[in-house]
Image: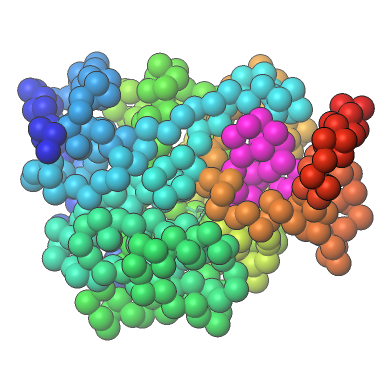
Amino acid sequence: MPPLSTPTPGVRQTEFRFRCIACGDVSDSASQNFRCPHCGDLLEITYPHWKESGHTTQELKSTWGQRRLSHSTIDLSGVWRFRELLPALERDDQAITLREGNTPLYELPQCARITGVPRLFAKHQGLNPTGSFKDAGMTVAATFARLAGFRWVACASTGNTSASMAAYAARGGMRSLVLVPEGKISWSKLSQALDYGAVTCQLRTDFDGCLRLLQELVLRAPVYQLNSINPFRLEGQKTLAFELLEQLDWQPPDHIIVPGGNLGNSSAIGKALLEMHALGLISRLPKLSVIQAEGANALVRTLREAAGKRLISVQAETRATAIRIGNPASWKKAAHVLEATGGACEQVTEVEIAQAKAEIGAEGIGCEPASAVTLAGLKKLVKQGFVKAEESVVLVLTGNLLKDPDYTMEFHRGDLFKGTAGENASAGLNPLRRPPIALDATLDAVMRTLEQAEK
Ligand code: F0G
């Protein structure tokens, strides 16, 4: 058993409260649906004592840097490494961790040429333990579920949340209940939940229907909900931004671009940017932009048609099933951080998503379709003049390529758009396709294929 964390003199952990994002009511505790008891809106976690805690920015940066050399369990987590800006634990060994975070920041030279933005990077959250960014939030929320004494945790999911929750529940000795839309999540994600031991229900509805049902369930049964409505999830997901800034030597990029589904992740990253700015860890705010699939564009429409004042829900449809969400729970939080950072909100077509995914794949890193909306969206933002060639841009790749192999195989075989509205437009993607080639097992046949490919 490795030793537990090295104590850090002078850096105290935080106390936190729940605050309603609409009426501002502040409370020590939250009900099981994580809604404000007065107005019913979402809660966020705040830290009223930060200012008195005596952290200097230099102290924080050097403490976090030193922990990268530590072998203690909690310091090996790329989330808990930043624990001064997270809800405090009484003891380090309370954290349920799978060594999440610590994800790479890659340069994207080929995509940089395609977009005309030389300083283009990808923060690859798909390299987390269960293959998506959800792990960063789950380590914190699952930990607090266990501390609150729950035996059962539950979520509605398009697949990644359920995979992550099931893993962390298993590690933490809790049972997990998964509600997913039948036939609308990838086999890889579903199989993860099964292997990690979740009770997995495929409901005859969409994600929004699953989430509605979960919200009722948590009021009736002693289960702890681990969707991103749960503000502990967003605290963990904040650390993506801390780690990114650390990787950039605390020089903020001009733009950060994220996919938008239920809008928890954009809200979390935005919260982190605002907190880092308020604490003086960064001197200016990057613009945080959200990209949605055209068929699941609730936030785009909400901002364009209702000036961000009320949610315009949509009947969601997209092959990027991770973001097939029409009624995003955290739309108000996301609208707030977009406004506060001066970011944009755009939508991209199915063909644009497929093209961007293949281009990211051709860089040798790959991602799942929902993550590729970021590159597709960047192309649009460059065209509009919102992103300029001399600016630096970070794309947040949220999920691993292996999360949705059916999509990738259909793309390369040329079947992805058969019989759909995108069929004609997708002809332009043929140079990106690399279908598998069935051959006789002869040297001649392989040599001919090699020569053909060289042409
Ligand atoms: N990218 C991937 C790979 C996702 O799995 C999700 C959400 C998103 C982007 C969007 O993030 O919801 O925070 O705006 N997946 C959820 C799930 C909803 O159940 O796995 P968001």
The quadrant where residue 355 appears: top right
Q: How many marks?
A: 0
| Residue 103 spot, x, y in % from top left | 42, 33
Q: Nearer the viewer, residue 182 or 210?
A: 182
Q: Is residue 362 magenta?
A: yes
Q: In this orientation, does residue 40 appear?
A: no
Seen in the picture, residue 59 relative to 149 is either above or below; the reply is: above
Seen in the picture, residue 325 relative to 66 is either above or below; the reply is: below
Residue 102 located left or right of residue 446: left
Q: Residue at x 40, y 16 (%)?
A: 249
Q: Residue at x 47, y 22 (%)?
A: 252
- In the rendered image, the residue lying farthest to the front is 442
Q: Residue at x 28, y 37 (%)?
A: 77
Q: Quadrant of the image for the N terminus?
A: top left
Magenta residues, as a range? 348-377
**Coloration of the structure image:** rainbow
Residue 91 located left or right of residue 328: left
The quadrant where residue 174 appears: bottom left
The quadrant where residue 38 appears: bottom left
Q: Residue at x 25, y 81 (%)?
A: 221
Seen in the picture, residue 412 relative to 262 is either above or below; the reply is: above
| Residue 385 spot, x, y in % from top left | 73, 29
Residue 29 located left or right of residue 312: left
Residue 143 located left or right of residue 434: left
| Residue 16 spot, x, y in % from top left | 18, 47
Q: In this orientation, does residue 171 appear?
A: yes
Q: Nearer the viewer, residue 293 or 343?
A: 293
Magenta stretch secondary structure, dominant: helix
Q: Is residue 391 magenta?
A: no
| Residue 172 spot, x, y in % from top left | 21, 57
Q: Quadrant of the image for the C terminus?
A: top right
